[in-house]
Image (cartoon, rainbow, N blue to C red):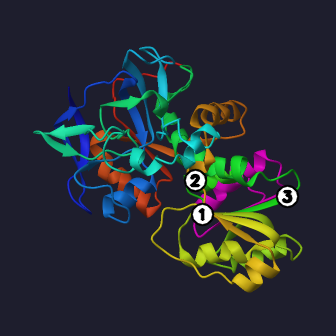
């Protein structure tokens, strides 16, 4: 089947929309999805420019939403016409998957970041030559074929164009707080960076009952949005020392939890210094940068922890519906971060994501989709 897709032909190249891409044939546990829309994530940009590599040419995109067109003979949970959000693939059979932690799937890298399908075959080809995929999904395309475990069924009374980032950015930020840090009511949290992941983490802190939810950024407009979405205090770290400001807001103690979404070395280090004794900082950005940690004062004497979290330790089939329910109740207004772009404007959408002009660009692939909710 020929599909249209945005292809990155070489490291650092712009997206080139092509209409001669051959989509792989379905296998028994596959579903074929007509992509309605997809978010653009900073992980897409990291691969496009070569900070992280899968291989080239590559079709990126891993925050897709769409409508099921066909299902394989072994598929049990989907039928044609279902609305779905796409996320990462986990094998479901390894020790960590069986423990209920699919983000730690022992085959995670092979399944999601190898550029090929789990069985080693090509997801997409052009004139017989392999094009690498991402997350066994590649949503920068009009149609894709994914495994049943990649997909989450979502309600049809919500605008499908808005929902794709629930499969990555929003579930990563919120899951880091709800699944991993697990703050108790009355504790405190600081979130460094108010992009989509950071704002999701911040809203999750509010949902968890944190009495101090401190958003840190250098962009006043984003900090204003953070207030609207539930931040109790904001700090512009361009104008004042973030660590000192956080200590002041917490009676000199620091916060119980911090989340860094910037990947900037100095900011990651600040997230550790802003912790109270026994505090935990989660550094979750895709970044090539390294940090210095004071192992004596921070890790030993102050008993602080620094952790990494992949995809919010989420189980998408559980976490995405939970976020949708929070959204329905007005507790997780993720769509306030979004802006729609046409498919042919994908390079502009990506540029606006990189510059920070748009928090969460949504590339609308299917212009014919009509939301009638």
Q: Dot 3: few (<14), some (14–19), or many (≥20) neighbours within 10 Å?
A: some
- Residue to which mark 2 is pinned: 197
Is the C terminus in the top left, top right, bottom left or bottom right quadrant? top right
How far across and down, in percent of the image, does residue 66 sit?
Answer: 42, 28
- Residue to which mark 3 is pinned: 187
SS category of the residue bearing label 1: loop
- Taking the spot 60% from the left edge, 35% from the top edge, the residue there is 320
Whole-number angstrom distance, CA of label 1 to CA of label 2 = 8 Å
- Taking the spot 37% from the left edge, 54% from the top edge, the residue there is 350
- Residue to which mark 1 is pinned: 193
Whole-number angstrom distance, CA of label 2 to CA of label 3 = 20 Å
Instruction: Out of 260 and 348, give the one closest to the viewer.
Output: 260
SS category of the residue bearing label 3: loop
User: Residue 95's quadrant in the figure?
Assistant: top right
Tell me, yes or no, if residue 369 can be seen here. no
Q: Which residues make up the magenta segment? A: 203-232
SS category of the residue bearing label 2: helix
Instruction: From the image, state whether disc 3 or disc 1 is nearer to you.
Output: 3
Instruction: Out of 106 and 56, give the one closest to the viewer.
Output: 106
Q: Count the marks.
A: 3
How far across and down, in percent of the image, does residue 354 sit?
Answer: 42, 61
Q: Earlier in the sequence, mark 3 or mark 1?
A: 3
Q: Earlier in the sequence, mark 2 or mark 3?
A: 3
């Amino acid at each position: 089947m020929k599909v249209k897709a945005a292809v990155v032909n070489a490291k650092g190249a712009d997206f080139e929309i092509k209409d001669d891409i051959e989509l792989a044939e379905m296998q028994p546990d596959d579903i074929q999805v007509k992509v309605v829309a997809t978010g653009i994530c900073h992980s897409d940009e990291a691969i496009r420019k070569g900070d992280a590599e899968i291989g080239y040419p590559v079709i990126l995109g891993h925050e897709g939403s769409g409508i099921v067109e066909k299902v394989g003979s072994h598929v049990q949970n989907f039928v044609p016409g279902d609305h779905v959000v796409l996320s990462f693939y986990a094998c479901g059979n390894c020790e960590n998957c069986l423990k209920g932690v699919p983000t730690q799937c022992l085959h995670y890298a092979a399944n999601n970041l190898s550029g090929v399908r789990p069985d080693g075959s090509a997801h997409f080809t052009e004139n017989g030559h392999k094009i690498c995929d991402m997350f066994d999904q590649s949503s920068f395309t009009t149609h894709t074929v994914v495994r049943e475990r990649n997909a989450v069924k979502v309600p049809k009374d919500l605008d499908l164009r808005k929902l794709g980032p629930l499969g990555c950015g929003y579930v990563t930020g919120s899951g880091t707080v709800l699944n991993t840090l697990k703050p108790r009511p009355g504790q405190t949290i600081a979130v460094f960076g108010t992009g989509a992941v950071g704002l999701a983490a911040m809203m999750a802190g509010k949902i968890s009952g944190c009495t101090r939810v401190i958003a840190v950024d250098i962009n006043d407009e984003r900090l204003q949005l953070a207030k609207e979405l539930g931040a109790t205090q904001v700090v512009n770290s361009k104008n004042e020392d973030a660590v000192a400001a956080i200590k002041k807001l917490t009676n000199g103690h620091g916060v119980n939890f911090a989340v860094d979404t910037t990947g900037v070395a100095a900011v990651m280090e600040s997230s550790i210094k802003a912790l109270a004794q026994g505090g935990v900082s989660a550094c979750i950005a895709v970044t090539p940068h390294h940090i210095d940690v004071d192992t004596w004062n921070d890790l030993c004497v102050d008993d602080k922890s620094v952790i990494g979290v992949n995809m919010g330790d989420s189980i998408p089939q559980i976490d995405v519906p939970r976020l949708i329910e929070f959204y329905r109740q007005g507790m997780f207004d993720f769509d306030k971060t979004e802006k729609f772009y046409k498919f042919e404007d994908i390079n502009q959408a990506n540029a606006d994501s990189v510059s920070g002009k748009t928090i969460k660009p949504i590339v609308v692939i299917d212009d014919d989709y009509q939301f009638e909710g």
